[in-house]
């Protein structure tokens, strides 16, 4: 185990988090919030500890690469440490005095889940509201991917990018890891700025535009008002609907557009099925709720927004869909499981995996009829190797095993079945709201400390796609050969 490299990278992470904390500090200075010096102190402490860790391990890490195991461990520890440090401002300020609750809120932010224990969001000072939303933007593309974009990297560091990036397959857009990470973040930042500008032009307050764009870009869903997005104009709601949908698309598609490789874009099956699933869900809900929401325009606007929100796992809401018909709620829960595209900022199982599962079922049915035939599974016209299929299948088995165990543990609290079930759906898929007591206007505050830590772990597992967290807690990882 290359401990020096692990500690050195964690030092880098703490330095970066110290820099990130200067953003809410600047907001606190601008609005003259009481939290400004506390935020500056936490930022300085994080940067100082990070610098010390790097100095202590700088010489010992030279000449040592980052293998797959180190990549997983660095990723898992980074997200846990990043969340713990990010929770400190909420605890020290007294707005969330319980470390468990603060950790829940910040993990929910960094993992772009959007589940909250807060019941009076609008009471928070703007500096903490900004930090809460900014964690979505940091976690959306991944803080380690950001580090790779701005620090010198090696080919071995592709193992970090693979461990942190969502989806069954992660490839470099260009030969060098640093260039790939830079391109991803450039596209991500550019789209975020575009949304901020558009919302401001549409009349949304500047502060709100920044916070909601951070949540949209990271597909996180922390609102800054009690009613989430409902009180904003229909024009702003439509803009956020489109933005959520676009951030749920594989960012490789945007790279292909920039490079004018339109043939490659047309081959992307995942994007095609992403459109089909989204359109199908919207159509069913519009048909089911046609006589209950109101006008046709309002029905379409609410359906497109809510489906875009849950399918991309953003979690914003413009209405209490907890009151919709059973069929519509079932469609919403199904969209939560499917999730967005691989290589996007969205969560869920991912459309590409769903496509692969259906294609494997089709192959097995074909082989039953034609036992001697050889039929390959293809995605985007290319053969999918058996190792990728095996990993996708193992992911699904681990996903449902963790889901079942988490569900049973949360059920110890004695809440109703739908609330307990959708609480797990909402956290492990990084969505935010569920149904009943954890619906769009509800919160997770009533759950026990045990349940909150189970849900915290589920959020991390969902964002890092299971294996980095499992490897971190696997005893064999730390044993000497």
Image (cartoon, rainbow, N blue to C red):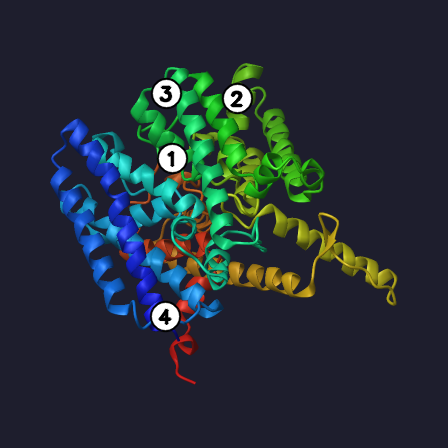
State the quadrant of the N terminus: bottom left
Could you say which is closer to the camera, residue 193 or residue 31?
193
- Does residue 21 lie above or below 275 as drawn? below
Q: CA distance from mark 1 to mark 3?
A: 18 Å
Q: Is residue 119 visible?
A: no
Relative placement, left or right, of 225 versus 261 is left
Q: Earlier in the sequence, mark 4 or mark 2?
A: 4
Where does residue 418 sit, x and y in percent of width and height?
45, 45
Determine which residue is flagged by label 1: 214
Where does residue 460 sit, x and y in percent of width and height?
40, 55
- Does residue 399 lie above or below 315 as drawn? below
- Mark seen at residue 301: 2
Q: CA distance from mark 2 to mark 1?
A: 22 Å
Q: Secondary structure at mark 1?
A: helix
Q: Is residue 400 visible?
A: yes
What crowding class fits label 2: few (fewer than 14 Cα within 10 Å), some (14-19), or many (20 or more)?
Answer: some
């Amino acid at each position: 185990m290359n401990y020096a490299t692990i500690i050195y990278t964690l030092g880098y992470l703490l330095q970066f988090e110290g820099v990130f904390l200067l953003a809410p500090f600047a907001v606190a200075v601008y609005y003259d919030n009481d939290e400004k010096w506390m935020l500056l102190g936490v930022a300085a402490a994080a940067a100082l500890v990070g610098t010390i860790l790097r100095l202590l391990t700088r010489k010992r890490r030279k000449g040592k690469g980052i293998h797959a195991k180190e990549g997983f461990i660095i990723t898992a520890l980074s997200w846990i440490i990043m969340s713990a440090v990010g929770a400190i401002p909420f605890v020290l300020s007294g707005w969330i005095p319980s470390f468990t609750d603060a950790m829940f809120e910040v993990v929910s932010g960094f993992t772009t889940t959007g589940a909250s224990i807060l019941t009076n969001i609008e009471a928070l000072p703007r500096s903490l509201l900004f930090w809460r939303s900014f964690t979505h933007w940091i976690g959306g593309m991944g803080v380690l991917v950001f580090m790779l974009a701005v620090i010198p990297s090696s080919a071995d560091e592709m193992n970090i990018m693979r461990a942190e990036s969502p989806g069954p397959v992660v490839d470099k857009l260009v030969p060098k890891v640093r260039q790939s990470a830079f391109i991803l973040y450039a596209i991500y930042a550019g789209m975020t700025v575009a949304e901020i500008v558009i919302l401001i032009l549409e009349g949304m307050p500047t502060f709100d535009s920044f916070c909601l764009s951070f949540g949209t870009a990271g597909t996180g869903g922390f609102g800054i008002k009690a009613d989430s997005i409902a009180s904003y104009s229909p024009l702003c709601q439509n803009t956020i609907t489109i933005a959520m949908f676009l951030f749920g698309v594989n960012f490789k598609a945007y790279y292909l557009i920039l490079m004018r490789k339109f043939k490659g874009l047309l081959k992307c099956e995942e994007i095609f099925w992403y459109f089909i699933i989204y359109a199908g869900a919207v159509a069913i809900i519009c048909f089911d709720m046609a006589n209950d929401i109101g006008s046709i325009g309002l029905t379409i606007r609410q359906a497109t927004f809510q489906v875009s929100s849950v399918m991309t796992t953003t979690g914003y809401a413009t209405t209490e869909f907890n009151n919709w018909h059973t069929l519509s709620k079932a469609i919403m829960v199904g969209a939560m499981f499917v999730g967005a595209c691989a290589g996007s900022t969205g969560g869920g199982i991912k459309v590409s995996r769903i496509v692969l599962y259906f294609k494997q079922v089709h192959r097995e049915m074909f082989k039953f009829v034609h036992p001697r035939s050889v039929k390959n599974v293809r995605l985007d016209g290319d053969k999918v190797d058996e190792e990728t299929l095996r990993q996708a299948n193992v992911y699904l088995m681990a996903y449902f095993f963790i889901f079942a165990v988490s569900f049973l543990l949360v059920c110890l609290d004695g809440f109703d079945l739908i609330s307990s079930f959708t609480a797990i759906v909402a956290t492990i898929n990084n969505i935010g709201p569920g149904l009943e007591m954890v619906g769009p206007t509800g919160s997770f505050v009533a759950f026990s400390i045990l349940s909150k830590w189970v849900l915290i772990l589920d959020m991390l597992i969902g964002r890092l796609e299971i294996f980095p967290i499992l490897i971190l807690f696997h005893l064999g990882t730390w044993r000497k050969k």
